[in-house]
Image (spheres, rainbow, N blue to C red):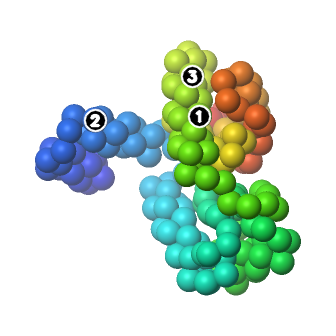
Amino acid sequence: MKFLMLLSFMMFTLTGCAGAMMAGTVKGAVMLNDERSIKTQLDDTNTDFVIDSKLRSNDELRSQSHITGVSMNGNVLLIGQAPSSRLRDLAINIVQSLKLGGKIHNQIRIGNPISFTTRSNDSWITTKVKGRMLNDKVLDMTKIKVVTENGEVFLLGLVSREQGDLAADIASKTAGVRKVIKVFEYVEPSANR
């Protein structure tokens, strides 16, 4: 209840556009329907910042690569590009040294960092995938996180296998998607509200 009051207060104190208020409302709905506890959700968000900060503190990684960490339920998905396997391994070692406790999914590609245009296109692909998922009457997209990197769509969340397969099918049929990679943790259907 305190969380809802805080969320309401934050939404009404926004001085920005109605879109910002809508985004806050949608984010609140996603947080409430997420299988993870609020504490785990906040820990995951904090972990994202810690990983990015630690990776950016390394001069070589910051200047030569584009690597991001996405945390979900204590597990970490590493995505992006490094020009060599040595730098990819350095990034993985840095994240391992944080001793986060979960599994690390390495999806760092060897190659030059993608351009700003490609990143913008990835954001558009993510928006399209989320929109298509939101329009599906069977899929509960509030339990799914969508991340796109260089046309590859990564799907994370705590879902049933049926929901995971449906999400992957929707994503794979979205224009611009080159590949879909499921990084789900599966729960029993009865536990999936």
Q: Is residue 46 shown above or below 116?
A: below
**Residue lying farthest to the right in this orientation:** 85
Numbered disc 2: secondary structure: helix
Q: Specify the amino acid type for callout 1.
A: Ile
State the residue in front, 134 or 17: 17
Q: Is residue 186 shown above or below 168?
A: below
Badge number at residue 19: 2
- Horizontal arrangement in the rendering, residue 40 relative to residue 71 (left or right): left
- Which of the 4 image quarters holds residue 162? top right
Comes first in the chain, label 1 or label 2? 2
Numbered disc 3: secondary structure: helix
Numbered disc 1: secondary structure: helix
User: Where does residue 92 sit, x and y in percent of width and height?
Assistant: 75, 74
Badge number at residue 132: 3
State the residue in front, 83 or 142: 83
The crowding category of the residue bearing disc 3, from other C-alpha atoms within 10 Å (few below 14, some 14 to 19, many at least 20), is some
The residue lying at 59 percent from left, 29 percent from top is: 129
The residue lying at 74 percent from left, 47 percent from top is: 183
- Which of the 4 image quarters holds residue 153? top right
Comes first in the chain, label 3 or label 1? 1
User: Where does residue 48 sit, x and y in percent of width and height?
Assistant: 54, 65
Residue 106 appears anywhere in the view: no
Q: Between label 3 and label 1, give the one nearer the viewer.
A: 1
Mark 3 → mark 1, Cα distance in angstroms: 11 Å
Mark 1 → mark 2, Cα distance in angstroms: 19 Å
Which quadrant: the C terminus?
Answer: top right
